[in-house]
Image: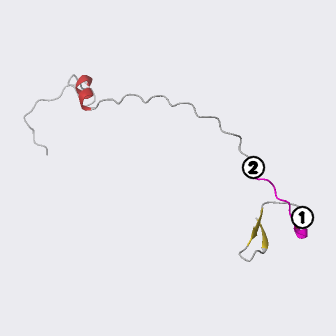
Amino acid sequence: MFEEMDGVPLTPASPTTQDHDSSANQSENPIPPPLPPRPPLPPRPPQSYPKMLPLLEDAFKDMTLVGTIKLYKDSSSNLHMTSA
C-alpha cells in the first residue's frame, strides 16, 4: 500500500516545529516594544438630562402614564400622541 522511502526516521529527541531554537526565531519575528501607558482621561461633567416641557394641551393633563408615549408634531404642526 505505502512504499518505503529511504530517509532518516525522526526520533522523539529530534527537534520538531514547536521545539525549535528560540534564538533563531527572534530574528525572523521580532517582538514589538510595549505600548506606552495612556494618560488618564479628564473627568467628564455629569450628563444633564433635557428639561421637561409642560404639556399645554388640555387633553393630556389628566392622563395616567402606563408604558411609553411619544409626542410629536407633523409637517402641518399638528400635535400627535402614540403609545407603546
* Residue 62: x %, y % from top left: 92, 64
> Which mark is nearer the camera, 2 or 1?
2
- Say what amino acid the circle numbered 2 marks: Tyr
Residue 28, relative to residue 69: is it above or below? above
Q: Magenta segment, principal secondary structure?
A: loop
Can you tell which quarter of the image residue 34 is in?
A: top left
Residue 1, relative to residue 84: is it above or below? above
* Residue at mark 2 to residue at mark 1: CA–CA distance: 23 Å
Q: Which residue is rendered at x = 76% and y = 74% of the image?
A: 77
Q: Residue furthest left?
A: 6
Q: Which residue is rendered at x = 91% and y = 69% of the image?
A: 58
Can you tell which quarter of the image residue 10 is in?
A: top left
Q: Residues within 10 Å of mark 1 (few under 14, many from 20)?
A: few
Kindly identify which numbered label has been placed on residue 63.
1
* Residue 83: x %, y % from top left: 78, 66
Q: Which residue is rendered at x = 86% and y = 63% of the image?
A: 55
Report the magenta residues as a range. 49-59
Is mark 2 in CB contact (under 8 Å) with mark 1? no
- Say what amino acid the circle numbered 1 marks: Met
- The verdict on residue 81 being magenta is no
Residue hosting label 2: 49
**How has the structure been colored for display?**
secondary structure
* Residue 60: x %, y % from top left: 88, 66
Label 1: state its secondary structure. Answer: loop
**First reached walking from the N terminus: tag 2 or tag 1:** 2
Q: Nearer the viewer, residue 67 or 49?
A: 49
User: In which quadrant of the rendered image does the C terminus lie?
Assistant: bottom right
* Residue 22: x %, y % from top left: 27, 24
